[in-house]
Amino acid sequence: MSPAILTIVISSLATGTIITMTSHHWLMAWIGLEMNTLAIIPIISIMHNPRSTEAATKYFLTQAAASAMILFSSMINAWQTGTWDITNLTSEPSHILLTMALAMKLGLAPMHFWLPEVLQGSTLTTALIITTWQKLAPMSLVYLTMNSLSTTILILLGLSSSIIGGWGGLNQTQTRKIMAFSSIAHLGWMIMISSIMPNIMILNLMIYLFMTTAMFCSLISSKSKTIQDTTTAWTLSPTLTTTMMILLLSLGGLPPLTGFMPKWLILEELVSQNLLPAAIIMAMSALLSLFFYLRISYTTTLTLSPNTTQTKFKWRFKPKHPTSLMMTFSTISIFLLPLTPLILM
């Protein structure tokens, strides 16, 4: 892709998200989401192979269906209340439709089927954009319409996403699919707390963005597309493999790493709201996710898989990608837990 076209596409992607996040009118929010979808399509299909074309098609169809549902929901609301204001969502059919549409946009279970497939068909860099930047616009709509959405539906979506995000990743060997199921599980935690404590949802989203970006940057610089690839990453850079292991444990939510903070705060809030069964299910589903994170961290740093002599080592070239972003986000993703009281202020 030529630099001029890439610049236009990336700026459209950024503009679409910003329009959605700053709008109070349903039509403007919808236009922002559409710009976002149309801008990411060429980025997904940049490789010109059948896998990436299929991924772009799947992404387009699901996002177009979700956008249509959002438009339909806002039209029903405008028809019944006479206003297009996002925060004034009083009609019951429209808020149920909106919840389903946003769940489809975000890839929440049971509307999650497109996410692992799309990530597997795209490059690691594109997968990074889909799992981080593309979540901002729908999450801002969740935040704006929080008081109108049904708490019961959100809690059920959160529970199903965290369970399926853990279960689905158990049998995967592709790092992109594992990161897709990881994304589903993390979004489940966010949606779970969204109607109870929005501030914790925003904190969880920020930490999720930091951890996922750091993890994808590590995978990109070590060119690890499968778990098999991670076993030989130590020859490239022992420091990188150690950082990857700690990042994976942080994604799994182990103390004393940053990833423990949102899980701790969410479970504490659920218990204080007397949602004890939900808290227990969420904690058990976190163990499922932890299993596959531990499996990758085990292959990355603790074992060397049976390889022939020719395939054991990767050449140590000068890294093509700048590592400053990776190291900044890795540091945030590892050492932020002691700052919890300061962040909660």
Image: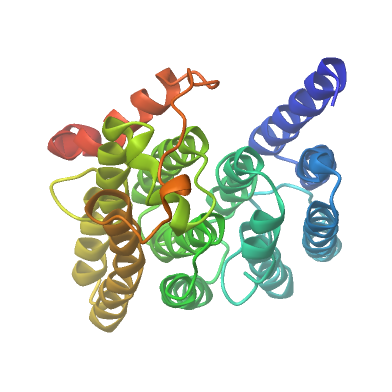
Q: Splitting the image into 4 quarters, where does residue 211 fall?
A: top left
* Residue 286 x/y as whole percent: 30, 69
Q: How many marks?
A: 0
Q: Between residues 240 and 68, which one lies in front from this camera angle?
A: 240
Q: Residue at x 77, y 47 (%)?
A: 26
| 242 on left or right of 91 | left
Q: Is residue 40 visible?
A: yes
| 27 on left or right of 87 | right
| 72 on left or right of 208 | right
* Residue 151 x/y as whole percent: 47, 71
| 4 on left or right of 204 | right
Residue sticking out furthest to the bottom = 277
Q: Residue at x 70, y 58 (%)?
A: 118
Residue sticking out furthest to the front = 309
Q: Residue at x 22, y 54 (%)?
A: 302
Tell me: residue 16, above or below residue 273. Answer: above
Q: Splitting the image into 4 quarters, where does residue 90 fall?
A: bottom right
* Residue 192 x/y as whole percent: 41, 66
| Quadrant placement of the N terminus | top right
Q: Is residue 31 visible?
A: no
Q: Between residues 126 and 73, which one lies in front from this camera angle?
A: 126
| Quadrant placement of the C terminus | top left
Q: Residue at x 55, y 20 (%)?
A: 320
Q: Between residues 82 and 287, which one lies in front from this camera angle?
A: 287
Tell me: residue 5, above or below residue 172. Answer: above
Q: Splitting the image into 4 quarters, where does residue 6 fall?
A: top right
* Residue 331 x/y as whole percent: 27, 29
Figure colour scheme: rainbow
